[in-house]
Image (tube, grey):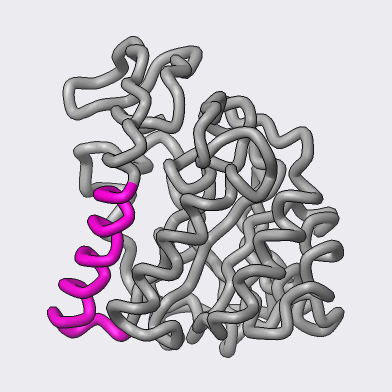
Amino acid sequence: MTGRTPSAVRQTGRIFSAEGWTDTVEPRALGEEEIGEVVQDFAMAARRAVDAGFDGVELHGANGYLIQEFPARSANRREDRYGGSVAARLAFPLEVVAAVAEQVGAARVALRISPGNPENDIVEEDGKEVYSRLLAELRRYELAYLHVIDTPDAEVLSHLRPLWPGTLVANLRSEEPTSRDQGESLIESGLADVVAFGRLFISNPDLPARFALHAPLAQADRDVYYSARLDGFTDFPAFDPDSAKFACSASS
């Protein structure tokens, strides 16, 4: 959770900081006026990104970050206009989308969501209703795309895909990196228009070329993810087809 949250709900466990693992602290609940300031912070950050040359921005409404905290009762215990009913809990995410779209244009804006993801102590008991309503409200903006994180059984994608007429990016959350076969299956089934690959890109900076060549894939080292080290994280070379024989690999 962030330093300022919908409600003063302390996250369990420990978190990784610049100084290493540390205990969590109780966050401070945002005041109602501050929420409007945070909405404008999102808008101005998007404006600066586009002015700096980026094609667009993706709002992070997943993994227990602030935009996901507001719709979740586990993190949002407010009794003002930002808490209580589904409509009230969705007010903050929708205000952020509206403000950012106004600043840079909806075609430059995307939203990432992870329904049902318990990361950072998020519990979404009424998640199906929440996300159904969220997508119904978002359709008016014609966003660049919707980025949905789901488990390999694609239960969330199966529910949300019929509700979203625009471009949908699927991102599978599992122990193993998403394979080429899984990605192709999602697209062929119509559950996604685009599939996101994360961990395989860490160890394969030329992943699209390797997929095209059916080349073997290097595996990343989970122990160095987001650490201060460079080796095993940013030093993987591109594949040289002349240096070794390779064969078709469905998931490597």
Q: Where does the N terminus fall, quadrant-wise?
A: top left
Is 120 above or below relative to 20? below
Does residue 88 show up?
Answer: yes
Residue 109 rendering spot, x and y as whole percentages: 42, 76
Nearer the observer, 169 or 32: 32
Prevailing secondary structure class for the magenta stretch in the rendered image: helix
Q: Residue at x 44, y 60 (%)?
A: 95
Residue 133 rendering spot, x and y as whole percentages: 72, 59
Is 169 above or below relative to 230? below
Q: Residue 3 appears in which quarter of the rendering?
A: top left
Which residues fall within the magenta stretch?
Answer: 36-55
Q: Residue at x 37, y 25 (%)?
A: 29
Residue 180 rendering spot, x and y as whole percentages: 68, 73
Q: Where does the C terminus fall, quadrant-wise?
A: bottom right
Q: Residue 77 appears in which quarter of the rendering?
A: top right
Q: Is residue 1 left or right of residue 178?
A: left
Is 95 above or below relative to 137? above
Q: Residue at x 53, y 52 (%)?
A: 91
Q: Residue 58 appears in which quarter of the rendering?
A: bottom left
